[in-house]
Image (cartoon, rainbow, N blue to C red):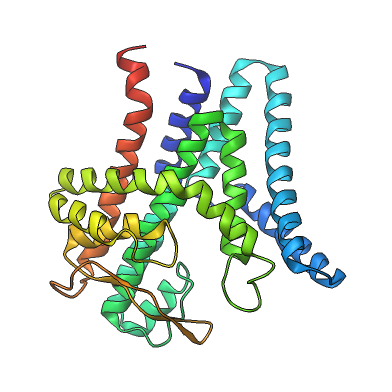
Amino acid sequence: MPDYILALGLGFLLDMLAGDPEWFPHPVRWMGKYITRMETRLRAKGGNLRAAAVALAASTVLLSTASTALVLFLLSLWGRLPLLIGMALINWTGLSMRCLMKEASGVRKALRQGVPQGRRQVARIVGRDTDTLDEHEIIAATIETVAENTVDGVVSPMVYSLLVGPVLMMGFKAVSTLDSMVGYMSPEYRDIGWFSARLDDGMNFIPARLTALLACAAAFVTGLDAKAAWRMVRRDHKNHTSPNCAWSEAAAAGALHIRLGGTHLYFGKPVVKPTIGDADRLPAAEDIFKTNRMMLTASLLMLALIMLPWILFL
């Protein structure tokens, strides 16, 4: 088994066991600081912000990949084991499965104390306004977030680490961080963030569709309705303003027999989105647990797809 495949498996294991501890230096935090400073400088210069958007994205990705490559090169000078450990640690920071499950479970626990607590907790993981959400809307928002982030928090990083190793994984994380910080359609960000948003759409295009297949398989494994999940993926995969988000969300909606999507407030203004799935019943708190379990199973299936051929046949 090549070391970069082994390192991906070790990074996955570390994420399952430890998540994202606050004490560990996380590359995404550094990316975020750079993006904030660079955005401020580009805005201060004035001029064409759409051109500045390209410079912001290109410089962030280049800095992230180049610094990762440099670290791995220096580790390689020490030998194979230090390089393997370094790749595993970088892969660990590129995955966010444990953190995502923890945050979603936190919403479920907060709702036991009341809707206001649930609103505050879900605001940690969603971009929409949460002040007016009722209990069912809070649960639906959490499920959407888990389903959507199964793509860019787990499957996409694994795909890019599989292709080129941790260097490309960090390039993807840079794009994902850019999109989460500036890739909005609001007037404030439409120009400075358009290129980051389009780049994120392109890099998630294939992983999003792969995630939908994995989610349907995970629904079957976990005892949910896999047939309904696949039916909703086929029917509703275009029901989103993003070309990618509805694929995994449709699988979750079908597996749980609930409706996701629809119009929500962002920065105080309604954003009209199509609905995903059928409202056979209202979302319940237990659905957060089921979605977490489906996401974990889909992630394990992805790992199996990567590693089993090397273990069994190569």
- Point out residue 123 in the picture as x, y percentages from the top left corner: 46, 74
Q: Quadrant of the C terminus?
A: top left
Query: Residue at 42% across / 44% down in the picture?
Result: 207
Query: Which quadrant holds residue 183?
Result: bottom right
Residue 45 lies in what quarter of the image? bottom right
Q: Give the x, y percent position of residue 195.
A: 64, 58
The relative height of residue 148 versus residue 259 in the rendered view (above or below) is: above
Where 67 sits versus 312, above or below? below
Q: Which is more toward the observer, 88 or 276?
A: 276
Classify 194 as above or below 267: above
Judge whether 155 appears above or below 246 on screen: above
Direction right: furthest residue: 45
Identify which residue is drawn at 69% across, 44% down.
64
Q: Residue at x 51, y 54 (%)?
A: 201
For the image shown, how many numbered marks are present on the structure? 0
Q: Is residue 96 visible?
A: no
Quarter that holds the N terminus:
top left
Left or right: where 66 falls relative to 224: right
Q: Residue reaching furthest top?
A: 314
Whole-percent x and y of residue 211? 34, 46
- The answer, for residue 260, to whether it is visible in the render is yes
In the rendered image, residue 97, in percent from the top left (x then y), is placed at: 41, 49
Q: Residue at 38% across / 74% down in the picture?
A: 273
Using the rendered view, name the quadrant where residue 138 is placed.
bottom left
